[in-house]
Amino acid sequence: MRVSAIVVSHGTAADVASLLPALEPQVDELVLIANVPGSAPAGVPAVENARPLGYAANLNLGLAQTKGEAVLAVNPDTRPEPDAVAILRAFMAAHPQCGVAGPKLVYPDGQLQPSRRRFPTVTGTIVRRTPLRRVVRQRRHYHLDEPAPMEPVQCDWMLGGFLLLRRAMLDELGGFDEGYRLYGEDIDLQYRAMRAGWERWYVPAALVQHVHQAVTDKRWLTRRTFWHWAGIVRFVRRHPERLRAL
């Protein structure tokens, strides 16, 4: 199973320069997309966008320019361990219904990042996107109410910072929904994958460091806040049955 990596950079050339030495030896093909000028390190080939695109649109652009049976969507602020991609690749190859395989993500200090999550509910979304999150803990949403798995487990969805995706699944689903500008495209894809019968697996043996700044969790009113709420609205419009999930 050949793996093609897609890295989308939006002015993060320094992060890309740090990522590539760890990522390139692990994949068969790599496409770097420079969403705005100055997004690629000097001397590194990149697809230069004439105008900025949303993250989902950039991933679809990368899909169209790669050929691997599996596609790795990679954020520039990740750092995979030397065997991370090989572990995910082997797992997906051994599980024909696995459409998405995600690693164990950790913060730079080594603490576990809650990347394995349950699909959104109405009350959970209200808590996470308002000041209520300061007093109401979302343990169930982040699987913090159970021991951290040591073996692969199926899950609803995983954070899109570093995901291995089966191309056959992407072709069936029509790729990412480009109506999402920055937030929600990973949830939407994995929700549609679930409805189409594709499995999503969390594979903790694969270890990846992820900075994950979580800007919308720290600042209330930024452009990203509005993009996040736009993603929530789009997800509900596309999947209104989730309104019954309180």
Image: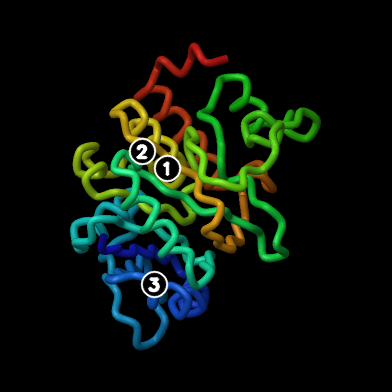
> Which callout, 2 or 3, points at the residue further toward the start of the chain?
3
Gap between marks 2 and 3, in whole Å? Answer: 25 Å
Q: Amino acid at mark 3?
A: Gln
Residue type at tag 1? Asp
Q: Which residue is mark 3?
A: 26
The reply, left or right, for residue 131 in relation to residue 209 is right
At 45% from the left edge and 42% from the top edge, which residue is drawn?
201
Which residue is nearer to you in this view: 92 or 49? 92
Name the residue tied to disc 2: 189
* Residue 82 position (above or below residue 227): below
Q: Amino acid at mark 2?
A: Leu
Mark 2: secondary structure? helix
Determine the secondary structure under disc 1.
helix
Marks 2 & 3, CB-CB < 8 Å contact = no
Mark 1 touching mark 2, by CB under 8 A? yes
Tell which tag, 3 or 1, sits nearer the viewer: 3
Q: Label 3: state its secondary structure.
A: helix
Taking 29 as reference, is 118 left or right? right
Query: Dot 1, crowdedness within 10 Å: few (<14), some or many (≥20)?
Result: some
- Image height check: is 50 above or below 138? below
Q: CA distance from mark 1 to mark 2?
A: 5 Å
Residue found 71% across the figure and 56% down from its top: 111
Disc ID at residue 186: 1
Q: Nearer the viewer, residue 146 or 111?
A: 146
